[in-house]
């Protein structure tokens, strides 16, 4: 929950280049993508060999692209968005989402005094080193005075070795947030977090207005912005609305299609032909 009203190896990655491109090609499947959100249809068709999708004539299974949903949630609001977001990612063929928490920085006694509810033990805590295994990452966190909560900032601060070697360069990433009030940082919390991605060379993926009519509704209170999904937590008792959850699911779908596009083979020719 955000109480603030303003600011508060498996796979080795290298700098974006031929080796990473080849690595992504080995995971890719060529197929059409169709996502319908709020009455709008978003289609992306990539030409390729359809037999790659199911292993083709070789009879081998194609490894799914993986999007890590990495979050910090104190009172469960961000966790609710994360779980709905996973549903969106998993709904796209060839892509799957994995939920992770970042480490807690507060003592158990402090959390008890703050009446923080028990957490889902089925969601593991992630280490910085594990981030290199993701094909895309969605980071979720509450606001503290318009910036990310200290727990998430501490996690980013632990990624120094990955930054030194630029292991996350070229990885698509996005944000989703929670705030206590309507003016509490739905946009600034994501905006100020972009600096973390920039130093890692990651590719920021906002949702823009791809949610369609749901981005313009004025008949109810709704968190979220072009920067990503969001929820208003109020004093902690307000639960995410169906519109907020639907926006989170859409962001999962949208991110999955983007990651899938990045994994597709692209022609290296410039389209020019020479004649003698």
Image (spheres, grey):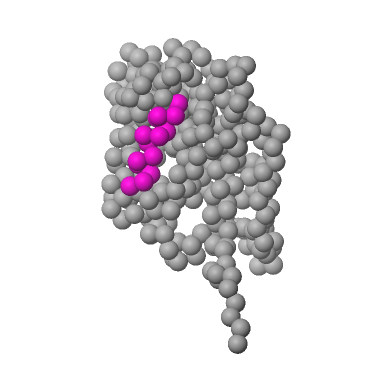
Q: In the image, what residue occupies the spot 36% across and 34% down?
A: 192
Where is residue 248 drawn, in percent x and y? Answer: 56, 31
**Looking at the magenta stretch, what is its main secondary structure?**
helix
Question: With 202 as the anchor, is 32 left or right in this view?
Answer: right
Q: Is residue 134 visible?
A: no
Q: In the image, what residue occupies the spot 31% across and 45% down?
A: 159
Q: Which one is nearer the viewer's eye here, 109 or 38?
A: 38
> Please, which residue is most extreme toward the front here?
276
> Please, which residue is most extreme toward the bottom here?
276
How many marks can you see? 0
Q: In the image, what residue occupies the spot 38% across and 44% down?
A: 197
152 magenta-colored: no
Q: Where does the N terminus fall, quadrant-wise? A: top left
Q: Is residue 160 visible?
A: yes
Where is residue 211 drawn, in percent x and y? Answer: 61, 34
Q: Where does the C terminus fall, quadrant-wise? A: bottom right
Where residue 272 sits, quadrant-wise, is: bottom right
Where is residue 220 drawn, in percent x and y? Answer: 60, 16
Where is residue 60 drawn, in percent x and y? Answer: 63, 62
Where residue 155 sits, quadrant-wise, is: top left
- The magenta stretch is 186-199
Above or below, 3 relative to 211: above
Q: Which one is nearer the viewer's eye here, 111 or 183?
A: 183
Q: In the image, what residue occupies the spot 55% across and 71% down?
A: 269
Question: With 92 as the anchor, is 153 left or right in this view?
Answer: left
Where residue 196 sits, quadrant-wise, is: top left
């Amino acid at each position: 929950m955000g109480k603030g009203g303003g600011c508060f190896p498996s796979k080795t990655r290298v700098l974006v280049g031929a080796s990473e491109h080849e690595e992504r090609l080995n995971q890719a499947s060529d197929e059409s993508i169709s996502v319908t959100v709020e009455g709008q249809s978003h289609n992306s068709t990539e030409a390729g060999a359809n037999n790659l999708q199911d292993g083709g004539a070789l009879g081998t299974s194609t490894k799914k692209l993986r999007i890590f949903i990495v979050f910090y949630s104190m009172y469960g609001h961000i966790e609710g968005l994360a779980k709905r977001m996973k549903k969106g990612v998993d709904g796209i063929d060839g892509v799957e989402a994995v939920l992770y928490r970042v480490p807690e920085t507060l003592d158990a006694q402090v959390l008890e005094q703050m009446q923080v509810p028990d957490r889902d033990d089925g969601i593991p805590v992630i280490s910085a080193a594990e981030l290199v295994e993701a094909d895309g990452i969605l980071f979720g966190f509450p606001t503290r005075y318009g910036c990310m909560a200290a727990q998430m900032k501490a996690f980013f601060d632990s990624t120094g070795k990955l930054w030194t070697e630029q292991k996350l360069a070229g990885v698509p990433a996005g944000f989703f947030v929670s705030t206590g009030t309507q003016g509490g940082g739905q946009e600034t919390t994501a905006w100020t977090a972009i600096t973390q991605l920039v130093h890692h060379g990651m590719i920021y993926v906002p949702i823009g207005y791809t949610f369609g009519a749901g981005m313009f509704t004025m008949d109810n209170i709704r968190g979220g912005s072009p920067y990503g999904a969001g929820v208003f937590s109020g004093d902690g008792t307000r639960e995410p609305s169906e519109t907020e959850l639907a926006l989170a699911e859409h962001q999962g779908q949208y991110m999955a299609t983007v990651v899938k596009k990045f994994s597709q083979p692209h022609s290296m020719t410039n389209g020019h032909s020479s004649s003698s």
